[in-house]
Image (spheres, helix red, strand yellow):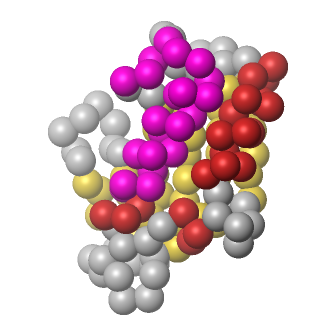
Amino acid sequence: MEVANTMMGQAKVDETLLADAAYLPGQVANLTRGASVMAQTNEILERIDDMLLREGTDKAEIILANIWLSDLASFEEMNRAWDAWMPDSGTPRRATFEDKNLPPMCAIRIDVAASRKSGAGQI
């Protein structure tokens, strides 16, 4: 299996591409840091849309999502943003955890893995 990493200039790798999948780990808010969980979630989901599109796939192809919240009490707020974002075709397997060690002013972190569409963005 061939693996390629992109956006290596940052402290962590933002995307890991496999021949048939794209993995986007560690997505946290930048512009809305310190704002509501809803605002941070929407920023992250918009970025995930852009990253998936660039890699030849989209949110309908997400097969797994892990979400970390700084406070599980904000689950419903995050979930409203997530449900509004997901296509009608259904939601992928998703787990949500509490993480009190997220970066300062970050209420949420999202990792996703998505299948690449056949023939799209081959390495």
* Residue 64, position as x, y percentages in the image: 65, 59
Asked if residue 108 can be seen in this view, the reply is no
Nearer-the-camera pick, 27 or 9: 27
User: Looking at this view, is 117 or 13 the one in front?
Assistant: 117
Above or below, 38 against 45 in this view is: above
Within the image, what quadrant is residue 8 found in?
A: top left
**Looking at the picture, does residue 87 appear above or below residue 8?**
below
Residue 45: where, in percent of width, then height? 51, 45
Q: Quadrant of the N terminus?
A: bottom left
Quadrant holding the C terminus: bottom left
Task: Give the residue at the far left of this rendering.
Answer: 9
Residue depicted at x 52% and y 73%: 115
The part of the image, by quadrant, that contains residue 101 is top right
Percent coordinates x, y for residue 118 in the rendering: 44, 88
Q: Which residue is at a point 66% across and 19% down the rendered structure image?
A: 70
Q: State whether residue 70 appears in this view.
A: yes
- Residue drawn at 48 percent across, 39 percent down: 44
Q: Quadrant of residue 9?
A: top left
In the rendered structure, the answer to whether residue 83 lies left or right of residue 32 reads right
Please state which of residues 78 and 65 is positioned toward the viewer in this rendering: 78
Q: Which residues are magenta?
A: 31-51
Where's residue 81, x and y in %? Answer: 65, 40
Number of callouts? 0
